Amino acid sequence: MTASFSDPILVLTADPQINSLVETLLQPEGFNIKIVSEISEARKAINEKLPRLVIMGERLPDGSGMAFARELNEITATTPVLLFVYQESTSVLKQAIQAGVIDTFTLPISGENFLKMVRNGLAVGDRRRGWMQKETRLATANLRSQMSDLETLSRLSQSITSQLDLDSVLSTVMDTAVSLTGAEESSLLLLDETSGELYLRASRNFNNEETNQEFRMGITDSLAGSVIRTGQPVLVDEENLKKIKTDYLVYSLIYVPLRTHDRTVGVLGVDNRNLKKPFNDYHVRLLMAVADFAAIAIENARTFSDTDNERARLETILTKVQDGVIILDSEQKIVFINQGAREALALSDEDLSYQSTDATVQINEILDLVTRGTTRAEINLSEGRVMDAQVTEIANVGTVITLHDISMFKELDRAKSDFVNTVSHDLRTPLTTILGYVELVERVGPVTDLQREYIRHVQMSVHNISNLVNDLLNLGRIEAGFDKHKEVVHIDRLIGESCENLKDQLAYKGHRLMVEIPPNLPPVWGSPILLAQVIDNLLGNAIKYTPPGGQIFIKVDLEEDQMILQFKDTGVGIPPMDLPFIFDKFFRASNASGEASGTGLGLAIVKSIVETHYGRIWVDSVLSQGSTFNVVLPLYVEGMEEKK
Ligand code: ADP
């Protein structure tokens, strides 16, 4: 708070003589006078407006004038106080001086002296205020300059966060270093990890004979090197020209360390070569702040370049990998397609946008194939090529389709099936011959009991082999798609026939059979012979793998456009570790007992048939409690015969 000329002279006195002095002498002079008689009033007045001068009495109705003068001296150092005392004794004067009073007076006093004293008091006040204003201006200027330094630093931090190009960020760093320290030149030296030398990465006005790029220095014999070694800043400020590493001469210089992750990776320097201008600690602190920003910029650039390299590496891998890779965004638009996928889908090289209708149609077909819980499908392409397509949803990426060429495996599988078919076929005739001759043995002459038992063994084994051969031929036919004939099939009828066919076996094992079929069951579209085989097989297995006196339950349900068939038994169940392989060819579970003979082909055949009917099959089983085989088949829809 500073006082101005219009500010009042505060008169605090209960003495009528002083009041009349003030009124007769000061008011005619045009001074702004405020008269109060109590300290409390004076405090209020001072709080509202600081007076230019206070004239007060020694004794006041609510306290001591001397004490109030002391209080005032602490509140405002610029307002002078004149004290009226009753007696100008040495001790009173001493107290007044200690209280910060500038002058005292007693009555009577001449008008002239009184005016002189007041004028002098006002002059002291003016001088004090003038001095105060000057000091404040100086302090403000200092603050302003520091503020501007901070603003410069904050601009630097903005430039670092808004720019990714290291060169332009470092150029800003160099400018900032020069402008904050008022230096002639600035330089940024980075440590070359391989050679252990410092090299010049950026500079401003750096005046070196050699080209900047070639400017290098060791760290053992240079001042900058000592900063690297100690991690501490260096301030050189000598009147004499100092030679830095025998390379260049300076009057004054600051080197500060550049730290990333607690490691000193370089040195930021400013210097004056021509001007004899010193640096101080404040400059060192500013330069340290700039170095921190430079370190962040370098670290950001490194991270960005690492990430960018990694991205480029992954892109190269994805592009060069032989398998096809297609990435779709959330709107199913192609965002990436590699060479493998382009070749698989026979897309022309010119189609750079990848969004050709040709590509979109083909990709939609793949997506259509891979539906309802399954994530992979086999796709038949032109020229007999077969691809295994896998679709994966990846959060924040979209849909990724990978295409793996399995044509060769398919071809091998076909060759193997052909071979098995031929061999099976060729085995049939000799097997029939063996059976025929074995049967003849008993007819052509008497045989012993032991011989009869051996003959029975031979017959059983040959029987098993012909079952196997029949199963193999069956499977071969189904896989090759020979039984193409399809018609409207009533599953309820097939179930009835199967139960009838197997009723002897059911009775033999003493099983109880329950069948639950909804009335008016709609038909499916398929081959009645093959579908009957599915039912025979699953019911046959349920009978075979359930110990005598068990329960078998066949249930049919409808769900939307699908039929769900369940074959549930209370049998031996399937060990969990065998479940994944149960539909594989020749696989028999580890708990399949010896007496329940089989080839391990039945379920493979069933699965093949279900799949050629666009259905699905799976099993739920608990060991020693029972198994449920579930088959889902699409219901017949009018017009299906033309489509499939
Ligand atoms: P096979 O019956 O000729 O051995 P399958 O292919 O029909 O061959 O069955 C494969 C294996 O699956 C069987 O050996 C048996 O271990 C197991 N299995 C099939 N059905 C059942 C069932 N209902 N309960 C328990 N195990 C079963």
Image: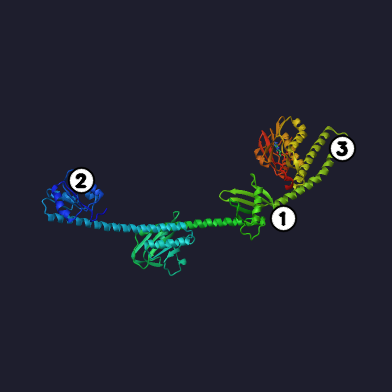
Between disc 2 and disc 1, the foreground one is: 2
Give, as a three-letter code, the residue at label 3: Leu
Amino acid, disc 2:
Ile
What residue sits right under mark 2 in the picture?
39
- Relative to 438, is 574 on the left or the right? left
- Looking at the picture, how far across and down is residue 3, in whole percent? 24, 54
Q: Is residue 640 visible?
A: yes
Residue 211 in picture, x, y percent from top left: 46, 68
Asked whether 309 or 209 is in front, the reply is 309
- Colouring scheme applied when the structure was drawn: rainbow
- Residue drawn where x is 79% and y is 39% of the image: 463
Give yes or no for contact between labels 2 and 1 (Cβ–Cβ under 8 Å).
no
Relative depth, front residue between 128 and 443: 128
Question: Mark 2 vs mark 1: which is more N-terminal?
Answer: 2
Residue behind mark 1: 383
- Element on which disc 2 rests: helix
Residue labelled with disc 3 = 440
Q: Nearer the viewer, mark 3 or mark 1?
A: 1
Percent x, y for residue 534?
A: 73, 39
Of the residues shown, which amino acid type is indicated by label 1?
Glu
Element carrying mark 3: helix
CA–CA distance in space, label 2 to label 1 = 112 Å
* Front residue (pair 294, 115): 115
